[in-house]
Image (cartoon, rainbow, N blue to C red):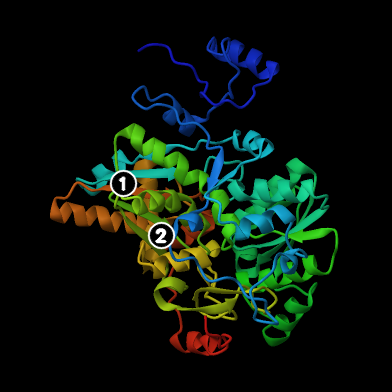
């Protein structure tokens, strides 16, 4: 086989030190004609870069805004006190100016700043891998591909938005950011980003996950973040919850209330959110933009696209660029969201205006919701324990451009073991939902004989979630289902507004 360069044809600058190191380590002479961004790949990136039959994919230089291509625009967020559409100045206590602009933008594409691209280049483009061993295990004619985001420093897709959010805050002179996190994927990503830009970082981690996942907390602390279990006694919102239930397992809605409270009361502090909002989903579209090119390089068109959903950022990041191509009539895949049976906002919630947090401090958003004070059972997929779905995903769902299902956690972990024992990767509890749905579809193809192309979002690794696997392997994991009465009680407290 002809000798290949390890260097992606990406026009980001490469330092002389890196060039010299590359030439010494790899004998790479391809850098002499043009400065390129070197990928010192681990095994997964090497699989993507060294495949002689697949052209390397360049790092996207723009984020894609799906709103621009929707003939029916999503309903606007409303002020929590006046119930009027939110104005930019209403959001300024929480977010820097550029993110506020992106939140309401109708521009089809938004340029990614060079400083953000430079950091993205540490791990992007991420690999698209065909799961041939899983196909063989399932004895299916389906061809299964997964877009693997676990190669990022934080081990998930979350740095795709953490980096630009911290960048825009730093550029505006903000000294500290605060946030909430469930499983810790988002909190660790924000802590990582803050360590690069020199910002302080404070995180409220949902109590159930704080106890279940100590190593994610240690990741955040290693990158310099201060971490509190939520609900906490530090904030008024947390104290109220603890008064009602001292043993509360917490929820993302409660943790959001605590972080927002701190941001709103400190002028040098802003709030960052890891999912749900438009600008967050926007930043994640680098996933789908890369994947479109990668699928084309493989000579494949997906028949079905599957991703897990909690707030929706991972799912949106992969699917939105494909929805664009679907709207343009170029492809027509089934696009399927998968959520936990214990927190099924899309499949069991109502489409209504509701608060994004438990205390009612955030704007009201038109979304699929289980009620802002709904506290899901402490399933192991802590990142999916959110009462609402991203407004833009909810809108796309209402337009009929996608579908949704829910799956219990024992089936998800059963699928995760099949995936680990065939493909080698241990998935975070969140993408096990996508794995389980993919296996369902692949087995259906075995029955029908259809050779469908299945594209799956594999949003992060589970190296710090092994206690969840231990519980499943020991036979101690049970399926936690939502309580109909609890949901009815929660839905009754949703503001009665007419969109």
Q: Quadrant of residue 12?
A: top right
Question: Does 360 sit above or below residue 316?
Answer: below
Residue located farthest toward the right when viewing the structure as drawn = 267
Which of discs 1 and 2 lies nearer the camera? The answer is: 1
Q: Is residue 98 left or right of residue 442?
A: right
Q: Position of residue 357 (x, y in %)?
A: 64, 74
Identify the residue at image location x=39%, y=46%: 420
Tell me which corner region of the image, top left, top right, bottom left or bottom right, holds residue 121. top right
Q: Which residue is mark 1?
A: 330
Lateral position of residue 425 relative to residue 374, left or right: left
Few, some or many residues within 10 Å of mark 1 (<14, 14–19, 20+): few
**Quick one: SS at disc 2?**
helix
Asked whether 321 or 17 is in front, the reply is: 321
In this view, the residue in front, 204 or 420, is: 204
Q: Horizontally, is 372 left or right of 403 in the view? A: right
x, y percent for residue 288: 45, 46
In x, y percent, where is residue 391?
52, 67
Residue 404 circle label: none
Question: What residue is rendered at 65% in x and 69% in y?
Answer: 207
Query: Relative to the observer, which residue lies in front, 188 or 39?
Result: 39
> CB atoms at circles 1 and 2 under 8 Å apart?
no
**Earlier along the polypeptide chain: callout 1 or callout 2?**
1
Percent coordinates x, y for residue 392 in the rendering: 50, 64
**Gap in Å between the C-alphas at discs 1 and 2?**
28 Å
Is 489 above or below relative to 237? below
Mark 1 falls on what kind of element?
Answer: loop
Q: Write down the residue under mark 2.
A: 433
Q: Is residue 463 above or below residue 252?
A: above
Give the vertical position of 453 relative to 342 (above or below). above
């Amino acid at each position: 086989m002809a000798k290949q360069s390890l260097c992606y044809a990406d026009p980001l600058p490469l330092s002389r030190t890196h060039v010299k190191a590359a030439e010494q380590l790899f004998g790479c002479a391809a850098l002499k004609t043009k400065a390129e961004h070197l990928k010192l790949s681990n095994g997964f990136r090497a699989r993507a870069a060294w495949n002689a039959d697949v052209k390397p994919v360049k790092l996207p230089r723009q984020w894609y805004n799906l709103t621009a291509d929707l003939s029916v625009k999503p309903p606007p967020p409303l002020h929590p006190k006046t119930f009027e559409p939110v104005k930019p100045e209403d959001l300024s206590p929480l977010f820097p100016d550029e993110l506020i602009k992106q939140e309401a933008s109708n521009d089809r594409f938004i340029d990614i700043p060079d400083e953000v691209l430079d950091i993205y280049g540490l791990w992007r483009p991420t690999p698209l891998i065909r799961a041939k061993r899983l196909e063989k295990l399932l004895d299916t004619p389906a061809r299964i591909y997964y877009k693997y985001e676990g190669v990022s420093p934080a081990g998930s897709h979350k740095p795709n938005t953490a980096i630009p959010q911290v960048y825009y805050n730093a550029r505006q002179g903000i000294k500290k950011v605060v946030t909430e996190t469930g499983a810790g994927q988002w909190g660790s990503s924000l802590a990582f980003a803050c360590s690069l830009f020199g910002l302080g970082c404070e995180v409220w981690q949902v109590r159930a996950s704080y106890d279940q996942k100590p190593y994610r907390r240690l990741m955040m602390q290693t990158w310099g973040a201060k971490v509190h279990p939520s609900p906490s006694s530090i904030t008024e919102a947390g104290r109220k919850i603890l008064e009602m239930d001292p043993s509360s397992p917490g929820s993302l809605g409660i943790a959001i209330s605590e972080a927002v409270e701190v941001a709103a009361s400190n002028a040098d502090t802003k709030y960052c959110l890891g999912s749900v909002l438009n600008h967050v989903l926007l930043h994640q579209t680098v996933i789908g933009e890369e994947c479109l090119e990668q699928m084309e390089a493989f000579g494949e068109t997906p028949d079905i696209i599957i991703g897990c959903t909690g707030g929706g950022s991972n799912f949106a990041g992969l699917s939105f660029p494909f929805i664009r191509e679907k709207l343009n009539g170029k492809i027509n895949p089934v696009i399927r969201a998968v959520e936990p049976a214990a927190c099924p906002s899309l499949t069991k919630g109502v489409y209504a205006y509701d608060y994004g947090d438990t205390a009612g401090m955030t704007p009201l958003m038109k979304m699929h919701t289980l009620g802002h004070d709904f506290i899901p059972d402490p399933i192991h997929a802590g990142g999916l324990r959110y009462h609402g779905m991203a407004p833009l995903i909810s809108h796309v769902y209402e337009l009929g451009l996608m579908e949704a299902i829910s799956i219990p956690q024992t089936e998800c972990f059963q699928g995760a073991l099949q995936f680990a024992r065939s493909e080698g990767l241990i998935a975070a509890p969140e993408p096990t939902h996508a794995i389980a749905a993919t296996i369902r579809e692949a087995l259906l193809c075995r029955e029908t004989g259809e050779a469908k192309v299945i594209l799956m979002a594999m949003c992060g690794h589970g190296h710090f979630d092994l206690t969840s696997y231990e519980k499943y392997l020991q036979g101690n994991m049970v399926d936690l289902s939502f309580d109909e009465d609890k949901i009815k009680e929660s839905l009754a407290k949703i503001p009665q507004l007419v969109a």
